[in-house]
Amino acid sequence: MSAATETTDVKPLTFRRFKDGDHKIKRWQEQIFDADHSHKCPTYIQSTPPCQASCPSGEDIRGYLNIVRGIEKPPAGVPWQEYAWRRLTEANPLPSVMGRVCPAPCESGCNRNEVEDFVGINSVEHFLGEYAIANNLQFPKPEKLTGKKVAVIGGGPAGLSAAYQLARKGHSVTIFDERAELGGMMRYGIPGFRTPRRVLDAEIQRILDLGVEARLNTRIGTDITLEQIQAEFDAVFLGLGAQSGRPLPVEGADAPNCVTATAFLKAFNDGRLRHVGKRVVVVGGGDTSIDVATVARRLGHIEQVHEKDRPEMAIAGHVAHDVASVSARQGAEVTLTSIFAVDKMQASKHEVEHALAEGIAIRGGLAPVAVVRGPDGRATALRVARCEASIKGGRLEIKMIEGTEEDIPADLIVSAIGQAVDFTGLEALNNGKGGISADKNYQVQGHKGMFVGGDVVRPHLLTTAIGHGAIAADSIDRYLAGEPLDKRPKIDVHTWDIQRKLIEKGLVLSEVHEPIRGTDSTNVAIHNFDNRSDRYVIPHEELFLGHFQYTPRHKRKIVTLTAEQALNNFDERVLPLTEAEAIAEAKRCMSCGLCFECDNCVVYCPQTAVFKVKKSQATTGRYVDTDYTKCIGCHICHDVCPTGYIQMGLGE
């Protein structure tokens, strides 16, 4: 390769101090100081980074990335991998699962997108989760029990999260689940090549090892009443989930081979479904529809299908497919339709790319009109029409284009247009909209001592359900202690704690008040420290982005299959980062809103007013301080602070 060619491969930074059209040089005196006196001095403000604010489970993302990269040191004798994992699992007890399947809204919010590309948060989470399983890390049991008993209804992500947090607080927890195994949609709704069962089982067992009891094959409302539960337990958490699929709202959708995505995936994950029809049509556009399509592509079809071997028979639970028949399987033609254009679908972009590579036809801008049925009543095709879909005022609007109808041949039609809650035996809890209404503390309205979370509140992501469970557990803990259920923080996430670092270092704290502020008379924090994590998300405009070099993201190895390779291939596709790759990726984190010890402020201060804290007193967040007798308020330290930790205050 020639030198000229090499230079063309270098990608320029996207950050620019000056924009096109800037033609005037502003007076630097106006920006740096006002004549001969100072009116502002540096303050040290801990803020919430947008990755954490975008994480529905509220992980302390910046915290564990700073541990992985080596900025925040673990206590003596604790490996950094374990210390980072424990920081991560304060919010989310299922990191290895979520590191694989979470669509990572944290990465969309990452400020590093303003430089070149987001930090691979999900991949570092994946690495830490795998380390914990490989090294058999366990959660510490509480030192004492409270004597309070809590029933958790539903063993999905919301219920497991609530059970985990409650058990850590010393409460006795029993999970009730109608299935034979815990996991909810993680087990019965997501295919095993995305959530390996060894991983799911390991992370669930770790929660049970805290002393959590599980009563399986027990459905509330039929096998045992809610009133009986309330009589036996001091509080109840409802994590019912939304495991009933929504059928297509069109004529003919009651055909036997027109099924819901949840029924399809459950039959597959149960091992009953071993093959599908030659032509499969999936209606949806979200990640669930992609899961159905990729499973169908892997299962394929067999010739000369007997009536008892039809896919709908296995999906309905009447019979399991004979393993011997699988040997003759062939590839299925799978088509996925969505009312939205392909680039506007809700499914993760990389999942769409995988589906396309595997030979799945994805057609956007199509709405189902009717299910075409043959003389035997079975569906033979899905009739669709071109449409324009948009969301206005929170409502979905679909404009059909007349004269564009067409039939897509189908031996099996799968509806992946949403999920519903089964309220059988629990009808009194239904708010009339197919869910359960709750307040900000996730307490069920009109039902004291009853709390709720997950899809039964609002169908959303697995990580959202985990966040609901954690917040509800906090509320249950306060309820059981007889404390008032106050308002939750505006930004309800787990944040870095300066007190923990001081205690770990063995420093004696002076009197501490909440919220923590640094004053001239307390040693809990540097002078003029203020933790605003509960109310302020730091935007990229507050960062000095020019500090960061272009550094490409260290991506996980993802196995991409062709249409032929996908058939009968149920191996995992996403491989974890190596240790070196995880560290390198964590180093791309810009530590928005918290000092990462770059020394810029110390080096560039013209008055030597900013200084390093003595090593014996220093911790993360207490790395630099200011001598206000020297400071002239020039705010150069603020200008060169990459993380936005230094703000200009005082005197306003």
Image: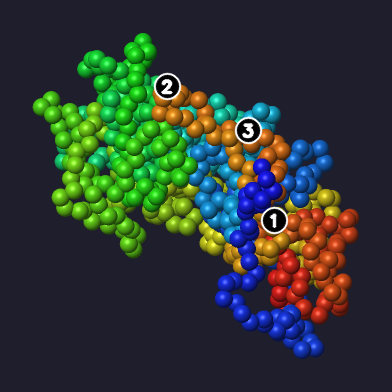
Label 3 or label 1, whichever lies nearer to me, is 1
Could you say which disc has been placed on residue 90 in the image?
A: none
Q: Secondary structure at mark 2?
A: loop
Q: Which residue is mark 1?
A: 549
Circle 3 packing at 10 Å, graded few (<14), some (14-19), many (20+), is many
Label 3 or label 2, whichever lies nearer to me, is 2
Rendered residue at 59%/38% (across/down)? 556
Q: Secondary structure at mark 3?
A: helix
Q: Are marks 1 and 2 in contact (CB under 8 Å)?
A: no
Residue 303 appears at what percent x and percent y?
27, 16
Residue type at mark 1 is: Gln
Disc 3 from disc 2: Cα separation:
26 Å
**Whether residue 458 is situated above or below residue 393 in the rendered picture:** above
Rendered residue at 69%/48% (across/down)? 3
Question: Quick one: label 1 or label 2, which is nearer the N terminus?
Answer: 1
Whether residue 242 is visible, yes or no, is yes
Disc 3 from disc 1: Cα separation:
30 Å
Q: Which residue is mark 3?
A: 130
Residue 450 appears at what percent x and percent y?
44, 48
Rendered residue at 34%/50% (across/down)? 341
Residue 473 appears at what percent x and percent y?
54, 47
Residue 330 appears at what percent x and percent y?
34, 20
Label 1 or label 2, whichever lies nearer to me, is 1
Residue type at mark 3 is: Glu
Q: Which residue is mark 2?
A: 568
